Amino acid sequence: MGSFTRLTGIALLALLAGPVDAQELAEEQVNLVSSRLAESARRSWEIGTRAQAILEHNATRYSVFANNDLPPPSNIPGDQQGPLEPLWNIARGVLSGGAGGNTAQPLVSDSAVSDPASIGVAVLLANYTNLDKKDDQYEHAARNQYDYLMSNAVPKNGQGAISHKTEQIQLWSDAVYMVPPFLAYYGVITNDRTPLDQAYEQIKQYRAQLYDSNAGAWKHIVGGNSGTDDSFWATGNAWAAAGMLRVYATIDKSKFSGKMKSQKKDIKNWVQEIHKGVYERYFDGENLLRNHLNDPNTFYDAASSALLASTVYRASTVMGQHKYVPYAERTRMTLFTPNTGPWTNTNWTRFGDYQYFTTDGWLRPVVDPMNTGNQGQNSPEAQAFVVLLHSAWRDWRWAGEKGKNAAGRIAASYSTVLVSALSIAVGSLLL
Ligand SMILES: *[C@@H]1O[C@H](CO)[C@@H](O)[C@H](O)[C@H]1NC(C)=O
Ligand SMILES: *[C@@H]1O[C@H](CO)[C@@H](O)[C@H](O)[C@H]1NC(C)=O
Ligand SMILES: *[C@@H]1O[C@H](CO)[C@@H](O)[C@H](O)[C@H]1NC(C)=O
C-alpha cells in the first residue's frame, strides 16, 4: 500500500509537470536566466547581445526572425510596448553617453572597433519608432556609428575588412556578430541597399581570413602583431554563424531580397560549413563543444554549445536547413534537463538540481569572455546564449519542428538513458 501511494505520487508529479516538457525550460526559468543577464551585461558587446536576446525572446515582432517583412511597423503595436521597454533603456543609455551629436563616432567608447556597433539595432529601432520624440538624436547616433565604421579612423585590411581593433588591423571571429547585423539593419531602416551589400562583404572578407578549410572551422583572431589566436575557439564559430544568420534573415525579409539571391546563397553555405565542420568533426557523446573545438585538453563549454545550437534552429526556420537539428537537440536536452531526469522539475522559478545551471540561473561551465583560453564563472554573454537558444528552439517548434524525425533516431538512445535514470530514481523511492 505504501509503495502504491508513492507510485501514484510519482505518476501525479509527472502529470503535474505536463505543461513543461521533459527537456525544456519553463518561461520562469528563462526569465531568471535573463535577470542574471540584465544585471551583469555591462560591456558594449554584452549590452548588444542582450538587446538581441530581448528582441528574440520578448519583442519578437521586432526581431529579424519574425515571420514578417522588414522594416517592422514604425507604430508600435500595443502588445510589443512592454517587451520593448528594456531595449529602449539600452538606447536611452547610449544617448545619455553623448552619441547623438554631429561627429562620426561609435555608440559608446570602447577599445574595440566592432563591439559598440552591436548596440546599433536598438538605436536604429529607437530612431525608426521615434522613441521619446528626441528629434533626430537617435538618427544621428546611428549614422555616427555607421560613418565611423566607414571612416579612415578605423583600420581596414586590403580587401576592406573592418578591423576589430583600433590600433592594428586585426580580425576576430566575434566581430561577425557585432558589425554585419548592424550594417544590414541600417540598410533596411534607411531604405538603402548599400549597407546590406557591405554587411555581406564584411562577412565574406572575414571568412576569407578566418575560415580554415582543413579544420572545417574558423580561427579566433588573425592579423596584427600581438594578441593573435589561431585556436578554433568554439564561441567564435558560434558568433560567426549567429551573425551570419541575422544578416541572412535581414536580407531575406527586406525588399532587396530578390536582387541579393547569390549573397543569400553564399551566406547559407557559410553557415552550413560551420555546422558541418563542428558537428561532424568535433561533437561527441558529451553533447557539448570543447572550448577549443579540436583540442581534447580543453574543457566542455556550455556557452558556445548553447549559441551554436541556437543557430541550428534558426538555420532550420529561416534557411530551410534541417540537417543538424539532431545535434542541436542533443545539446539542448543535455543543458536543460534536471539531474533527476525528465518530468522531475517541480519548482519552475529556479534551478533546483541542474548540472549546467546554478540554483539562481547562471550557466556552467562557461569560458571566461575576457580570457578565452580559460574557464570562467558568471558570463553575461553565456546568459544571453541560453535565452537565444530557448527562443530559437521555441520558434522552430512553432514552425513545425522540421528535422525532428532525424532527431528521433538519435534522441531515442538518449531517452533510454533518461528513462533508466528515472526508473533507478523510482526504484530507490520504493525501497
Ligand atoms: C522577457 O520578459 C520577461 C517578462 O517581463 C522578463 O522577465 C525577461 O527578463 C525578458 N527577457 C529578456 C531577455 O530580457
Ligand atoms: C531614421 O528613421 C527614419 C524614419 O523615421 C528614416 O527615414 C531614416 O532613414 C532613419 N535614419 C537612420 C540613420 O536610421
Ligand atoms: C521555488 O523556489 C523559490 C526560490 O528558492 C522559493 O521562494 C519558492 O518557495 C519555491 N516554490 C516551491 C513551490 O517550492
Image (cartoon, rainbow, N blue to C red):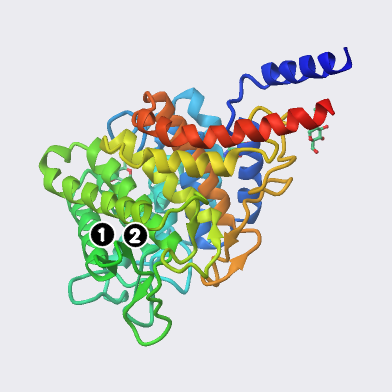
- Rendered-image quadrant of the N terminus: top right
Residue marked by disc 2:
176
Closer to the camera, 16 or 228?
Answer: 16
Rendered image quadrant of residue 295: bottom left
Mark closer to the chain start, 2 or 1: 2
Q: Looking at the image, which residue is at 75% across and 28% down?
A: 426
Mark 2–mark 1 contact, CB under 8 Å? yes
Left-right relation of 324 to 82: left
* Side (left or right) of 313 relative to 358: left
Left or right for 243, reference 50 = left
Question: Can I make out residue 143 in this image?
Answer: yes
Horizontal and vertical percent for residue 208? 22, 67
Q: Please name whichever residue, 170 or 427, is drawn nearer the observer in this view of the structure.
A: 427
Nearer the observer, 274 or 414: 414
Please provide percent x and percent y for residue 289.
47, 56
Tell me the number on the disc at residue 203.
Answer: 1
**Which residue is at 34% across, 31% downward?**
403
Tell me which corner region of the image, top left, top right, bottom left or bottom right, holds residue 129. top left
Q: For residue 382, what is the image quadrant?
A: bottom right
Crowding near pointer 1: few (<14 within 10 Å), some, many (20+)?
Answer: many
User: Visible in this render: residue 71?
Assistant: no
Disc 2 residue type?
Val
Q: Tell me the kind of residue under disc 1.
A: Ile
Q: Which is nearer the eye, 328 or 266?
A: 328
x, y percent for residue 89: 56, 46
Q: Residues within 10 Å of mark 2 (few under 14, many from 20)?
A: many
- Left or right? Give the position of 124 relative to 253: right
Q: Say which element carries label 2.
A: helix
